[in-house]
Amino acid sequence: MATIADDPASPKGRPEGELRPLGRRRSGEAASVGRSRPTPWDVRSQRVVFGVLTAIAVVFLVGPTIIVLLTSFTATESLRFPPRGYSLRWYRALLDADQMQAAAWNSLIVAFWTTLASVVLGTAAALGVAGSRTRFARIADVLFMSPLVLPALAFGFAALVYIHLLGFHPSIPLLVVGHVVVCVPFVLRTTLAALAQVDRALFDASASLGAGRFMTFRRVTLPLIARGVGAGAFLAFMASFDNVPVSLFLADERTEVLPIHLWQQIDTNLDVRTAAISGVIIVVTIALMVLAERFAGLSRQLSR
Amino acid sequence: MRRGNSSPTLLPVSDEWPLALPLAALFVVCFVAPFFVLLALSLHADADMMTFSAAQYAKFFGDAFNLSILWSTLWLAVRATLVCLVFGYPIAWVCSRAPARWQSALVFVVVLPILTSVVVRTFAWIVILGREGVMNDVLRALRIVDEPVPLLFTETGVIAVLAQVQMPLMVLPLFATLSRIDPNLGDASAALGAGAWRTFFRVTLPLSAPGLVAGCILVFSACATAFVTQTLIGGARLVYMPLHIYQQAIGANNWPFAATISVVFTVAVMIVLYALNRAGRMSKAYGDDR
C-alpha cells in the first residue's frame, strides 16, 4: 500500500476508512466499518441504486409490449387494460381487413428486396472499406453511416422532390431504393464489426495454399463473417418493415405499407384491430429474434 | 473490435476498395443528389425552381413560430436523451457485470423494443397514457391524483415514450464499452482506497465516455426525427420539426418552404452531432491514454 502516500489527500497512517472521503460524507459513521466486511456500504448502495434503476428501466422497456399483447385479446370493443374478458375476435377480424393485409404484403415485399440489396451492397462495401486505408474509404464510411443519424424524414422528402424532378412516380422499386439507403448501414455496421475480428493471417494462409481470391472469399472470409452479415440482414429487414419517414413520401395509396397504414389508423380512428395486428407483429418479431439469436448470435453482434 | 488497428486485408490483395464502389454510387445518386436537389429547391421561390431567391430562409428565420418549433424539437431530444442516459447507464452497467447467461437475457430485453415496430410501440403507449389508461389507473390507485390527468398530447408524455422507444440505442454502445473496460482497473482503484462510488465516477464513467457519446448521438438524432412518436403522442397541437416538414410538404403543398425547413433541421442536427462527436473524440483520446 505504498501508493497511499502518493495521494496528497491521504497522509500515511490514517485508518483505512478515512481514505474514502465520499464514503464518509454519505454514510457518516458507517465508513469506519472499513473494507474488511464482505460487502461494504458503498458497494451495497451502488448495487441497490443501479439495481433499482435497472429494474424500473426493464419494466419500462417490456411493460408496454406486454400490455398491448394482452389488450389485443380483449373480448370488448375498448382498448382498456386489463381487458374484461378475453377472446380471439379481433384476430379473426384481421382476416377480413383487406386493406391492412395488402399493406402488410407490400411491407413484406419491400423488406425482402431491401434486405437482399442491403446484404449484397453492404457486405461488398464493408469488405472494401475495412481493408482500405485510403481517403476514399474513410469518406465512404462516414457517408454510408450518415442515414442512421441524419433526419430520415428530411431524406424522405428530399427523395420525393428528387424523383418528382426526374419525372418518376411512387412505385415499389423506388420505395425499395429509398429503404436500402436507410437500411444498409445496419448490414455495414455488423459486417465491419465481424471483419475487425478476423485474423488476416488466415487470408495469407489461404493464399499460400493456392486458393484464389474468390475461393478465399467463399471458403474463408464468408464463413467467418456470416454471423455478422446475418445479424445485419435481420436488422435491415426489421428497419425496412418498420420504416415510416421514407415510406411516408415514397408510397402512395397503391403501394401503401403497413406502418403508414397503422399510423393513419391510430391517428384517425383507433380500433382494437390495431391491437391485434400489433400482437401479430410482436409475436413474429420475438420469433425472428429467437431465430436471429440462435443463428447469428444477435445479442453478441449488437453489443460490440 | 476497434476497426483500423490491424487493418485486415480481406483477400490476399492489398486493397479492396473497389468493392465499395457500387454502394458509393448508390449513395451519390440516391442520397447525396436528393439532398442537393432539396438544397436547390429551398433556394427558390417556386416549386418549379424558376426564380432563385433566399425568401424561404428569410421567412423561416423571420418567424418566431418556426424558430420555436426548431428549438422545442432540439430541446425535446436533449431531454429524452438525458432520460435514456439515467436509465440506460444502469442497465448497461448491470449487464456488463452480469454472468454470461443473464447478459444475453438482458440484451434480449433491451433489444426487444427497438425491433418491435415503432408504430406498435407508440400505440402501446396510447393504451397506457390515455384518460382511461393504465397510468391513470395506477396514479389514482396510489392516490397521487383524484381525477384522470392528461398524459397523452403532453410534452412529458412524448419524452417518456421517446425515452422508452430509443433506450436500446443508448444501452447497446454503453454495454459494449463497459464490457471492454479491464476489471483490474476497478480492483486497482479499490486497492488504492477509493470507494465503489468514487471508483465509478473517477474510473468507470470516464472510461465509458466513448460509448456514452455514441449512445447520445444515436438517441439524440433518433428522438429529434421520431415522426411517429411525436405525432401520435404529441397530437396535432405539439408541432415538432418532422411534422412541420410533413405539414408544409403534403398538407400545404409548399415544397420550397418544406425544403427550407428540412435543410435547416438537417443542419441543426448535424451541428449538435458534430459537437457531440468532438466531445467523444476528446474523451476517446483521454480513454485510450493508458
Image (tube, rainbow, N blue to C red):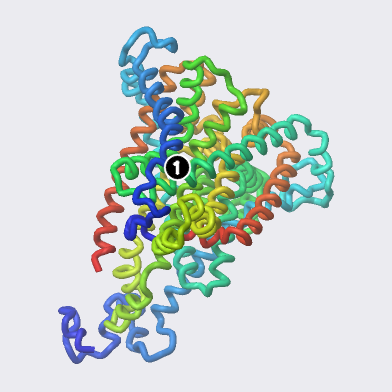
Mark 1 burial class by Cα count in 10 Å: few <14, some 14-19, many 20+: some
Camera-side residue of A154 and A12:
A154
Camera-side residue of B200 and B68:
B200
Q: Residue at x 49, y 29 (%)?
A: A156
The x and y percentages for residue B69 are: 41, 31
In the figure, residue B109 lies in which quadrant?
bottom right
Q: Secondary structure at mark 1?
A: helix
Question: In the picture shown, does residue B93 fall above or below A165?
Answer: below
Q: Residue at x 33, y 78 (%)?
A: B195
The x and y percentages for residue A303 are: 48, 60
Question: In the picture shown, does residue B6 fall above or below A139?
Answer: below
Camera-side residue of B214 and A108:
A108
The x and y percentages for residue B13 are: 37, 51
Q: Residue at x 65, y 28 (%)?
A: A256
Instruction: Quadrant for the N terminus of chain B, please.
Output: bottom left
Residue A197 appearing in the image: no
Camera-side residue of B8 and A95:
B8
Q: Amino acid at mark 1?
A: Leu
Instruction: Quadrant for the C terminus of chain B, please.
Output: bottom left
Residue that lies at the very extreme toward the top in this rendered image: B50
Parent chain of label 1: A
Q: Residue at x 37, y 11 (%)?
A: B45
Residue that lies at the very extreme toward the front in this rendered image: A210
Q: Is residue B99 left or right of residue B218?
A: right
**How many numbered tags mark residues here?**
1
Q: Is residue A258 left or right of residue B31?
A: right
In the figure, residue A79 lies in which quadrant?
top right
The x and y percentages for residue B152 are: 58, 41
The residue at which mark 1 appears reads as A148
Residue A52 appearing in the image: yes
